[in-house]
């Protein structure tokens, strides 16, 4: 797990102080202003790298929350489907009961055409149920894939923050105590074509 930002900043500051002062206390050797300037130069890459790691951590947390919400939506969809199925079954029984009552009240036997009408009604309800089942299963499957992708993206975000921090430290490195080139260094750089 990543350090909290407060501890990360304190660690970077302590490391920068130790490096900038050569391991001595920040206030014992040389001028305080010079030591603070050196600490700031040395700490900058570490603070930047820490910020990149923390940013990756925060993005991962946000993506995990999105994945949890998508899982919640899938669970809600399953529960809503179960309720629709029960409601549809009740409606089917009610409709078939009404048809039977109407046919009986009219003195019509339930064989033949009345039976076909009730079968057709039941078939319509079954078709509606099948369509709802198919659509719901596709919706739930889509949400599960989305949740899995968000969780994977969260892991990559953590890795990305750490990689970005490592690249920052690897390419910028730690700035040496003396960042002002001497006259000899300047002349040597001009000799090889750097101006």
Image: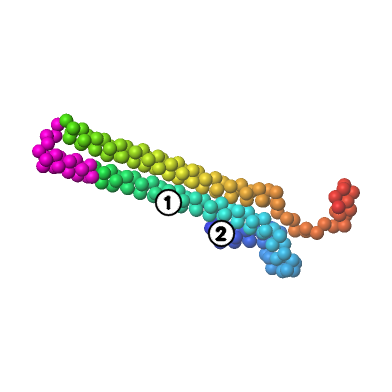
Number of other residues with Cα within 10 Å of mark 2, as a class: few under 14, some 14 to 19, many 20 or more: some
Q: Nearer the viewer, residue 61 or 105?
A: 105
* Left or right: where 151 falls relative to 190: left
Indicate whether 73 appears above or below 7.
Answer: above
> Is the stretch drawn in magenta largely helix, strand or loop?
helix
Residue wearing tag 1? 69
Q: Nearer the viewer, residue 130 or 68?
A: 130
Q: Residue at x 17, y 43 (%)?
A: 98
* Left or right: where 75 falls relative to 8: left
Residue lying at the far top in this picture: please name it. 112
User: Which structural element holds mark 1?
Assistant: helix
Q: Nearer the viewer, residue 173 or 67?
A: 67
Q: Where does the magenta region start and end?
A: 90-111
Q: Nearer the viewer, residue 128 or 55?
A: 128
* Left or right: where 188 falls relative to 145: right
Indicate whether 189 appears above or below 6.
Answer: above
Q: Is residue 18 magenta?
A: no
User: Which structural element holds mark 2?
Assistant: helix
Instruction: Report the number of numbered marks.
Output: 2
Residue 153 in sight here: yes
Residue 116 x, y percent position in the rendering: 20, 33
């Amino acid at each position: 797990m990543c350090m909290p930002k407060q501890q990360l900043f304190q660690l970077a500051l302590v490391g920068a102080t130790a490096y900038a002062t050569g391991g001595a206390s920040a206030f014992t050797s040389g001028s305080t202003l010079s030591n603070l300037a050196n600490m700031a130069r040395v700490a900058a890459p570490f603070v930047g790298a820490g910020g990149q790691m923390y940013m990756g951590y925060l993005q991962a947390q946000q993506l995990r929350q999105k994945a949890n919400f998508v899982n919640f939506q899938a669970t809600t969809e399953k529960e809503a489907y179960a309720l629709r199925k029960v409601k549809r079954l009740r409606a089917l029984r009610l409709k078939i009961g009404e048809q039977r009552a109407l046919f009986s009240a009219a003195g019509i036997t339930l064989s033949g055409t009345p039976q076909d009408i009730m079968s057709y009604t039941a078939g319509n309800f079954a078709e509606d149920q099948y369509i709802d089942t198919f659509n719901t299963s596709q919706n739930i499957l889509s949400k599960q894939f989305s949740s899995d992708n968000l969780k994977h993206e969260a892991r990559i975000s953590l890795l990305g923050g750490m990689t970005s921090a490592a690249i920052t430290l690897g390419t910028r490195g730690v700035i040496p105590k003396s960042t002002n080139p001497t006259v000899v260094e300047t002349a040597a750089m001009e000799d090889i074509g750097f101006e």
